[in-house]
């Protein structure tokens, strides 16, 4: 289902921008959100309340501050430079906020994220894998979007069509991974998915600053396929590693890590485009960094995801 949505998004976004205007890229979310609320109220059963586990606002504020400051530093580095006092200050405050979160979790009666859960290699490694492949994939989509429009002169709708090979592969890869996992387990699927995605990003980086579009189709398909091929296994690994009482915490950790990766990939990709000689060179740098992220995720998958015969650490 996520693959279908990912495939429709760039095309629908390009169509909206080309017809009724860019604001509708945001306004379209209002009826979508209303439909989600209605479906949730109708079909999602209420979960038991846990009054013994209240919210922890200081920890949540610390997480928000750490992530926002990190993304701001990555984003502003392209305009101000990596040594600018504002960039360095934002990065330092991000680290301080992260340390404050850890300190709070050590003392909290009901921590947002019990730090003991991170001792599970499967849980912490799976979350790191999710961060890395979202970082690489959404950094690619963002920089490629600007490249197609500003370097090649594509329209918004043309850019959506140009990106379609990358996002269309996600629906096929996720369905295939779900079927194969019952035979092979998740580790080989995540490792192979990350290696395929790394090959795609590396092929684009090696294609030159202004390659023919036909040369980019296979690399985009490989990156989209590999990312989605690994998603199912990484998700299942994280959820299986957590004790049942902390299933919601594990799900939140994994999704938060993925969204941090997406935001960092977009911010850093924009910085590469701003500091490179041209958009083509900026995209090549972004693809090279994405390749490194995919390869790191493959190594983590080999080390952290249990083989079918192993019992999850949780």
Image (cartoon, rainbow, N blue to C red):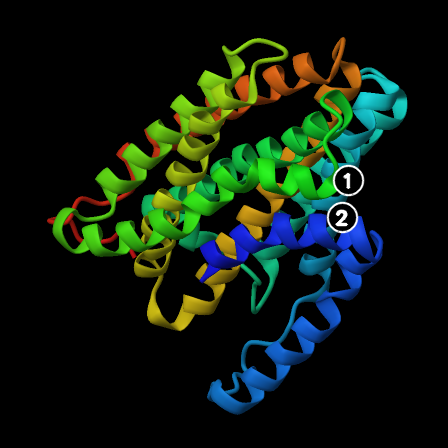
Residue 156's place in the image compared with 277, above or below, is below
Across and down, in percent, residue 104 comes to 64, 55
Q: Is residue 138 visible?
A: no
- Residue linked to disc 2: 65
Whether residues under marks 1 and 2 lie with C-beta atoms below 8 angstroms apart, the answer is yes
Q: Quadrant of residue 69?
A: top right
How far is disc 1 from disc 2 in space, using C-alphas? 6 Å
Q: Residue at x 42, y 53 (%)?
A: 116
Depicted 17 relative to depicted 81: above or below:
below
In the figure, is residue 81 to the left or right of 202?
Answer: right
The residue nearer to you, when weighing 252 against 132, is: 132
The structure residue drawn at horizontal position 12% and vertical position 51%, both measured from the top left corner, is: 183
Instruction: Name the residue that disc number 1 marks.
Output: 69
The percent position of residue 96, horizontal first and vertical second, equals: 73, 38
Q: Position of residue 108 (x, y in %)?
A: 60, 63
Say which element carries label 2.
helix
**Residue 29 in view:** yes
């Amino acid at each position: 289902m996520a693959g279908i949505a990912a495939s429709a998004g760039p095309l629908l976004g390009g169509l909206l921008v080309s017809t009724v205007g860019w604001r509708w890229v945001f306004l379209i979310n209002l009826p979508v959100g209303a439909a989600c609320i209605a479906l949730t109220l109708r079909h999602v059963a209420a979960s038991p309340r846990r009054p013994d586990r209240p919210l922890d606002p200081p920890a949540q504020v610390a997480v928000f501050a750490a992530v926002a400051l990190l993304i701001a530093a990555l984003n502003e580095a392209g305009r101000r430079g990596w040594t600018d006092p504002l960039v360095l200050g934002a990065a330092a405050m991000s680290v301080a906020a992260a340390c404050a979160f850890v300190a709070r979790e050590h003392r909290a009666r009901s921590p947002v994220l019990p730090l003991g859960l991170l001792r599970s290699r499967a849980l912490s490694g799976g979350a790191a894998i999710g961060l890395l492949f979202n970082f690489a994939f959404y950094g690619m989509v963002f920089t490629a979007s600007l490249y197609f429009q500003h370097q090649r002169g594509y329209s918004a709708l043309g850019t959506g069509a140009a990106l379609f090979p990358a996002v269309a592969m996600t629906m096929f890869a996720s369905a295939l991974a779900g079927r194969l996992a019952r035979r092979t387990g998740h580790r080989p699927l995540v490792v192979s998915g990350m290696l395929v995605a790394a090959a795609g990003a590396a092929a684009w980086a090696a294609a030159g600053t202004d390659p023919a579009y036909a040369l980019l189709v296979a690399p985009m398909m490989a990156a989209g396929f590999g990312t989605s091929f690994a998603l199912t296994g990484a998700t299942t690994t994280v959820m299986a590693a957590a004790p049942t009482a902390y299933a919601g915490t594990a799900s939140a950790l994994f999704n938060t890590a993925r969204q941090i990766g997406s935001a960092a990939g977009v911010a850093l990709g924009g910085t590469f485009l701003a500091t490179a000689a041209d958009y083509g060179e900026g995209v090549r740098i972004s693809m090279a960094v994405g390749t490194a992220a995919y390869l790191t995720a493959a190594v983590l998958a080999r080390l952290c995801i249990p083989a079918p015969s192993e019992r999850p650490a949780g």
